[in-house]
Each structure stands twice: as structure tokens, then as C-alpha cells.
Image (cartoon, rainbow, N blue to C red):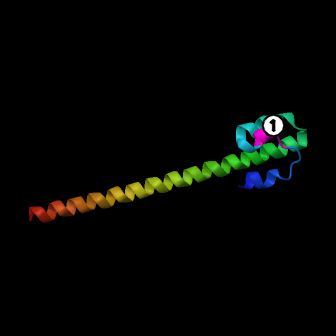
């Protein structure tokens, strides 16, 4: 979201830069030095935001899975203990 918001500050951004980070890096190489640097920084920032979002979601999914499996194992052991008594 930050990427698209700040791209409005740059004049004449090619459409390819709005579609992907790779496109933004390619477009930045063809722009003037100062504008290209801004676009590269925005693309880098967008990548880091997406990377951290994926990492947080992955960690949360793993934690939920571990907690679910732990709870399932406890219930299974309790049910086997109650049937053996």
C-alpha cells in the first residue's frame, strides 16, 4: 500500500513499475538518477513489507498448527487413559 501511495509523487511512472517490483526496478534503471533512486527505494520498501507480512502469517500458521496438534494429542491420550480404566 505504501508503494502505490508514494508512487504518485513521481512524475511519469511507466505502467510496468506499478505492476511488480521487478518492473519498478527495470523502470528505475531507465529514469533520471534521482527519480530512479526514489523508485528503487520504494520498491525495496514494498518488498520488505511483503516479506515481513508473509513471515508473520507463516509463523502464525505454524503456531496454530502446533497448538492444535498439541491439544489433539492431549485429548487422544486422555481418551485412551479413560477407556483403559
Residue in the picture at 81% in, 50% down = 7
In which image quadrant can residue 17 be found?
top right
37 over 2 or under it: above or below: above
Query: Foreground residue, 12 or 26?
Result: 12
Residue in the picture at 82% in, 40% down = 14
Q: Position of residue 76 (x, y in %)?
A: 22, 59
Q: Residue furthest front?
A: 15
Query: Foreground residue, 2 or 11?
Result: 11
Q: Which residues are magenta?
A: 13-17
The residue carrying pointer 1 sits among few (fewer than 14), some (14 to 19) or many (20 or more) residues within 10 Å by Cα, namely: some
Q: Quadrant of the C terminus?
A: bottom left
Q: Residue furthest left?
A: 85
Judged from the image, the secondary structure of the residue bearing numbered disc 1 is: helix
Residue in the picture at 15% in, 62% down = 81
64 over 17 or under it: above or below: below
Residue in the picture at 72% in, 42% down = 19
* Figure label count: 1
Q: Main secondary structure of the magenta part?
A: helix
Q: Is residue 31 left or right of residue 44?
A: right
Q: Quadrant of the N terminus?
A: bottom right
Q: Decide whether residue 14 is among the magenta residues.
A: yes
Q: Is residue 73 left or right of residue 46?
A: left
Q: Position of residue 20 (x, y in %)?
A: 70, 41
Query: Foreground residue, 15 or 49?
Result: 15
Residue position marked by numbered label 1 in the rendering:
27
Q: Position of residue 64 (x, y in %)?
A: 42, 58
Amino acid at each position: 500500500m505504501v508503494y502505490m501511495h508514494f508512487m504518485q509523487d513521481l512524475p511519469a511512472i511507466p505502467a510496468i513499475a506499478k505492476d511488480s517490483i521487478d518492473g519498478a526496478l527495470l523502470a528505475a534503471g531507465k529514469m533520471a538518477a534521482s527519480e530512479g533512486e526514489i523508485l528503487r527505494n520504494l520498491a525495496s520498501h514494498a518488498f520488505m513489507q511483503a516479506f515481513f507480512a508473509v513471515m508473520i502469517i507463516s509463523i502464525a500458521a505454524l503456531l496454530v498448527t502446533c497448538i492444535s496438534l498439541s491439544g489433539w494429542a492431549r485429548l487422544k491420550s486422555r481418551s485412551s487413559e479413560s477407556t483403559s480404566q
